[in-house]
Amino acid sequence: MGRRLQKETKLVRVYGDLVAKLNEASNREGISFLDYINSALEQAVRAHKMGRSLKDIVDFYEMMMMQREAGLVMVPSEVLNKITERFYPNEKNMLESMWYESGVWYGKYLLVKVKREDPTDVFGEMLKATGWNIKDVVLERHGEKLTFKCFSLMLSLENTALLMRFIEGVMETLGYEVVSQNYLRGVIEIEFRKTTKVDLSSIINKKLGV
């Protein structure tokens, strides 16, 4: 039997605490430390060839898993636009209420899931990761005020209005109240003010007129 050919290896300096975590991960995977490290580095090179960093891809995957756990599903924008255009004129209040309530629930979900980062920043990134082709989400902070802007080429006027209600529900749950709002087809701009305490029941009851 011939000798197994081995690739040349190099000595690379790595932080000691990171080595411990990598060793623990490789043991959980049931593979050697060397194979685990090489696989991770190969994926980093693969991500680079895609024009992305490995962090970008892992963050995106994490957001997609959060979307899945939250019960969100992907619907073709053309289908969503047509359904909304069909029912919005006669069911405007009901639809806006549903989207707002969904936003309140989603905001509560973010409060539970997001610990290491600002939930509002995570929400902005998750909006960009949706299938609505949202080109940009901007959060401008000025003291206690926050201006939320987003832009999409795929949203109809009606769905823009519904998305705005969803955003309001999320942000109010995260501790902000609406100061002013404006929207055009595919363009939303809302100014919020930080509140001192979040009372989810009062938010929902106020919007539903209870």
Image (spheres, rainbow, N blue to C red):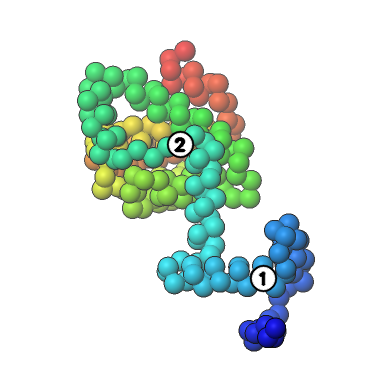
Instruction: Determine which quarter of the picture holds residue 9.
Output: bottom right
Residue, disc 1 = 35
Mark 2 surroundings: few (<14), some (14-19) or many (≥20) residues within 10 A: few
Which residue lies at the image location 27% right of the left edge and 35% below the top edge? 79
Residue 89 in picture, x, y percent from top left: 22, 22
Residue type, mark 1 in image: Asp
Residue type, mark 2 in image: Leu
Q: Is residue 133 above or below residue 83?
A: below
Q: Is residue 185 left or right of residue 124?
A: left
Q: Is residue 148 left or right of residue 64?
A: left
Q: Earlier in the sequence, mark 2 or mark 1?
A: 1
Kindly report which numbered mark, 2 or 1, lies closer to the viewer in this rendering. 1
Of helix, strand and loop, which one carries label 2? loop
Residue 18 in picture, x, y percent from top left: 72, 67
Q: Is residue 183 above or below residue 135?
A: above
> Marks 2/1: CA distance?
36 Å
The residue nearer to you, when weighing 207 against 106, is 106
Which residue lies at the image location 28% right of the left edge and 19% below the top edge? 91
Q: Is residue 112 above or below residue 28?
A: above
Residue 124 in picture, x, y percent from top left: 45, 47
Which residue lies at the image location 34% right of the left edge and 44% below the top edge? 132
Q: Is residue 135 visible?
A: yes
Of helix, strand and loop, which one carries label 1? helix
Residue, disc 2 = 72
The residue nearer to you, when weighing 159 against 121, is 159
